[in-house]
Image (cartoon, helix red, strand yellow):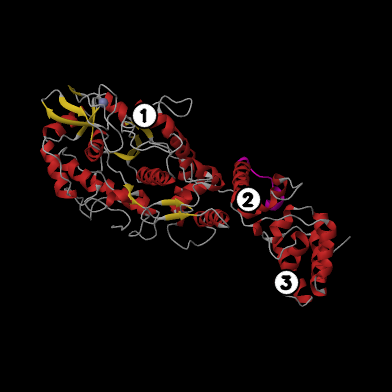
Amino acid sequence: MTNQDVKVKKSTKTKTPPDETKKLPIEKEQKNENRMFWADSLAKEMLEKYPDVNHVVSDAKTPSGKIHVGALRGVILHDVVYRALLDAGAKASFIYRFDDFDPMDSISADLSEKFSKYMGMPLCDIPSPIAGYDNYAQAYANDFIEAFEKVGNHPKIVSTAKDYRDGKFNDLIRVSLEKSDLVTQINSKISGTKKDSGWLPIHVLCESCGRIGTTFAHDFDGKTVAYTCSGAKYSKGCNFSGRRSPFDGGSKLTWKVQWAAQFKVYNVTMEGGGKDHYTVGGSREVADATSVQLFNYTPPFDMAYEFFLVGGKKMSSSKGVGTSAQEITNLLSPQILRFLVVKYKPRTAINFSPYADTIPKLYDDYESFADSYFGRKQARDPDEPRIFALSQVSRNELEKPIDRWKPSFSLVAYLIQIPHVNLLTAMENAKGSPLTELEKEDLKETERAAKVWLESYADPADKISILQQTEGVKRFLDLSKGQQNALAEFADFFANNFDQTKQAEKAREVSIKNEISVKDFFQAAYTVLVGKKEGPRLLPFLATLNRQFIVQRLKGVQ
Ligand SMILES: [Zn+2]
């Protein structure tokens, strides 16, 4: 059950024998028992290693500014593992940690003037740049929480600063101070980092200036440490020297030691991270070794994931949509955004460009995966149904996604460009029956996303309008005799026949009769309606427009 996309720790001491026990329910759904969706495979392995614990899936971020879409990929992937655990029958919870006790060590240009004086202070102690929040960290954390909740992730939120101040890290701070030589050794052996003698793996909160990133600590006497606020690369210190207790929020651990401590404090059994943490001798390797050797805690299962870029770098400033998590949730419907993440394995880089037809294609892909799930077509990839299920925003739907009628994104995008078209009526005509409440909700969301796409990203070729009467007739007269006759004969049939399968047959029949190709027939229809040689799928499109108008236009009536 190895999977190249999920790096699983091999430090496992107890391993369940392979011939063991009953099969997990999830396995029954798989045709090939040896082949599983990567998250199900990971969940199975976690359950085999720890059958009786409450599994804790954890993800984290330092809320130092607007949070990038790459971190959103992290939340969704962790949520997928969490859901896979629940589906496999595990007891599991999902937490999201904001490392808000970290110092501010960089600042965006727009805040620089007002906020540079706070450099080096814990993010949770800096005022919010946006009205309505208690502090700087909370403002950006909230923006991000809003974004990931929209997409169906509901982890329990943890503030590292609060837990430091509540004393939850005290025991581990003590161990780290008492065994600081071991920390130095681990760092030196794995990452080659050298530390000055007397170095301690903490940052003390300066009692004089309130900075935490600028202090140098030494000499732990069992209760207090000595420190000097001597400054850091990004900020001057205040030069204060003194002694204070490192406990109850008096200090924080240096970050790789802190990462290891967090595994233990929150009983984490699975936590991944961006691939930049996974270099040889990198931070995750150091954190894992620290977890084992210093804190006697088996490191959690792992998952390294690749970048998620939106349109490379050129996007960030133009067109109002950049690369923050919040911005992409405005661009794509929630289940489509989840789908975009779930569809790719963690180790595959996602470089999403919203231009041209990427977005309509993504919506079409989603519908095609839905068809695999509901058994309307044979899946090209056996993971398709599972990917569709895990792309659902609500877990109720995950247990049993609800089948519903959906128009293609392109059709909605075309129709909203045509004046006097009532979208709902048009859709009910296309479906052939009234829309359910869920279908109406879907339609609203698709309409919203289609508007954003048309305004900012669509090619001019995707923009259409119905030709005015005179122009339409002129185009009709420009067609070949065969095309004119074929359209007119089709129009007579179309006037009284609502069945799209029969209409398609008729289109073929009149083409053959008038000695033109079916392609010529369709091009002729698009030409008289929208003045182009192509457009949305013709028959569903015709179903949404006024029937009398279509009949007259296809006959070239003045
Ligand atoms: Zn200071």
Number of labels in the image equals: 3
Question: Are there few (<14), some (14-19), or many (20+) residues within 10 Å of tag 1?
Answer: few
Image coords of residue 263 (percent x, y): 25, 38
The residue under label 2 is which amino acid type?
Leu
From the image, state whether disc 2 or disc 1 is nearer to you: 1
Instruction: Find numbered disc 2 in the image and state the secondary structure of the residue it sits on.
Output: helix
Instruction: Please give the range of residues in magenta.
Output: 428-437
Image coords of residue 146 (percent x, y): 47, 35
Image coords of residue 2 (percent x, y): 28, 58
Q: Are marks 3 and 2 in contact (CB under 8 Å)?
A: no
Can you tell which quarter of the image residue 209 is in? Answer: top left
Using the numbered discs, state the Cα–Cα distance from disc 3 to disc 2 in whole angstroms.
Answer: 28 Å
Using the numbered discs, state the Cα–Cα distance from disc 1 to disc 3 in whole angstroms.
Answer: 70 Å
User: Camera-side residue: 484 or 80?
Assistant: 484
The residue under label 1 is which amino acid type?
Lys
From the image, state whether disc 1 or disc 3 is nearer to you: 1
Residue 412 drawn in magenta = no
Residue 117 numbered tag: 1
Q: Mark 2 or mark 1: which comes first in sequence? A: 1
- Quarter of the image with the C terminus is bottom right
From the image, state whether disc 3 or disc 2 is nearer to you: 2
- Asked if residue 106 lies left or right of residue 186, the reply is right
Q: Is residue 292 above or below residue 348?
A: above
Rendered residue at 84%/62% (across/down): 473
Q: Are marks 2 and 1 in contact (CB under 8 Å)?
A: no
Q: Is residue 373 among the parts visible in the rendering?
A: yes
User: Camera-side residue: 471 or 74?
Assistant: 471
Can you tell which quarter of the image residue 462 is in? Answer: bottom right
Q: Mark 1 or mark 3: which comes first in sequence? A: 1
